[in-house]
Amino acid sequence: MEKGMISVDRWSEESQAYFLTHLHADHTKGLSSNWRKGPLFCSPITAKLFPPKFPDFDLSFIRVLEIGTSHSLALLSPSSGSKITFHVTVIDADHCPGAVMFLFEGEFGRLLYTGDFRWEGTSERALEGKSVLVEALKGGTVDFLYLDNTYCNPSFLFPPREVVANQVVKIISAYPDHDVIIAINTLGKEDLLIHIAKALNIKTILVINEPHLAFCWPLKIWVWPERLQTMHLLGFHGIFTTNTSLTRVRAVPMYSFSINTLEELNKMRPTIGIMPSGLPWVVKRLDQNDYSVGSLKVFQGPKRGTATDQDHVCRNQKYEDISPYTKLHRYIYSVPYSDHSCFSELQEFFKLVKPMNIRGIVSSSTCYIDPLYYLGKLSDSDKLIEGTNMKLHKLKVDESGESSQGKSVCCNLSIGARFRRKSSKKISSLGVRSGRVTSTRRSKRGVSIAEIASGV
């Protein structure tokens, strides 16, 4: 495939076709209301959420691809002008509403771009995605895999999201006289909020000025106005509100969630905060009443080199009797509710697709974890390394890191070192040092498929 034909989550390149995995900001950097480069392929839900995200965007550029189906597309060769046909299969990524993976197949071979994804063994959506992928592969393998390597390290072991959601309900129930704020982004974590609303759907007594003017309401969850619009577009009605007087549970933007905010709120009313994230938030306790930020992980699995398949089986029953949360501050809980795959899930995914070549999509900050380092031993390592060290005439990829803009990068094993940078050591609003993952999620991702020779 020649240069200038396909780009995935990359919006600055000139291509004939553009593919968007989902609407999180780190995958849409460079995409704007004025963007007019060419047809943009995405899932139906992503297309529905597009107008409020990009007002005045020319929707005639959007091409909707149904999830779970294979689509035949034709582009023109820039050099010869001849038609080149390939197939793309759209697979549910179980990350956030509308998130998908793209499996490209043609004379160049098979290329799978996961975008951000959660390969959770207990998730119905992930199981449906697996069924689609297995059917598309038909027992074959993937020639090149672009993998969500956010947590590609044996240290990261997350419980299933349902288990963590139950723990969040327990935390909220333990504070019946407290307001609760939950930090979320502009898209994602909807299932968690729905779970909380259903589990705590008891009649809440609200007193307005005088005790005798009390009303009973079913529990709702407060969200900010833009988030409420998103919830309605996703079909969630009657559960969320922008009226703070109707609920003690509020979902707030991640940027507004901080220790200072919780301390100020507690001057007015008892309030706890919950941070649902796979990020390694922790604190070092200096004494019984003093907390300061540290750098350990919230929920840590076996150390490197000791992981086995049995150790990493993420199943609900394994976690039911444990409490996968950390109290960061007297007002704040952190829970490992992640929409990215943990290491054991990445292992399972890797074994399924059996890639000849692999590259992590998170490569433009200090946190790059070369997937081959931990996953290579699961395959025929000589064969995988040989494939991943292909020269430029076999496969050129324009990576999305700032340091690679304007040049093609060979798919080789030095890519991790090539993209590593010194940590800025900035402190986040929660007081947690911005490190491995926080800086990454703000980075721009994506690839421009520049050249794939037949026979890869």
Image: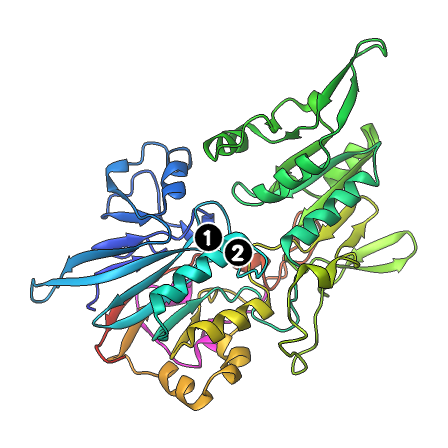
Does 258 sit left or right of 268 as displayed? left
Among numbered discs 1 and 2, the one appearing first in the sequence? 1
Foreground residue among 307 and 55: 307
> In the rendered view, would you say 57 is above or below 25?
above
**Res 270 label:** none
| Kind of residue sitting beneath label 2 | Arg
For the point 42% across and 59% down, the residue is 445
For the point 80% across and 43% down, the residue is 331
Residue 409 visible (yes or no) = yes
Q: How many marks?
A: 2
Q: In which image quadrant can residue 138 be found?
A: bottom left
**Quarter of the image where the N terminus is located:** bottom left
Q: Which residues are magenta?
A: 398-423
Foreground residue among 104 and 281: 104
For the point 53% across and 56% down, the residue is 441
Percent x, y of residue 65 = 31, 48
For the point 80% across and 52% down, the residue is 327
Foreground residue among 124 and 141: 124
Does 392 sit left or right of 219 as displayed? left
Label 1 and label 2: CA atoms lie apart by 6 Å
Disc 2 element: helix
Q: In which image quadrant can residue 49 be found?
A: top left
Contact between marks 1 and 2 (CB within 8 A): the answer is: yes
* Classed neighbour count for the residue bearing mark 2: other residues with Cα under 10 Å, few (<14), some (14–19), many (≥20): some
Q: In which image quadrant can residue 207 be found?
A: top right
The residue identified by callout 2 is: 441
| Kind of residue sitting beneath label 1 | Asp
Residue 398 visible (yes or no) = no
> In the rendered view, would you say 271 is above or below 288?
above
Does 298 sit left or right of 137 as displayed? right
Residue 420 lies within the magenta run: yes
The residue identified by callout 1 is: 26
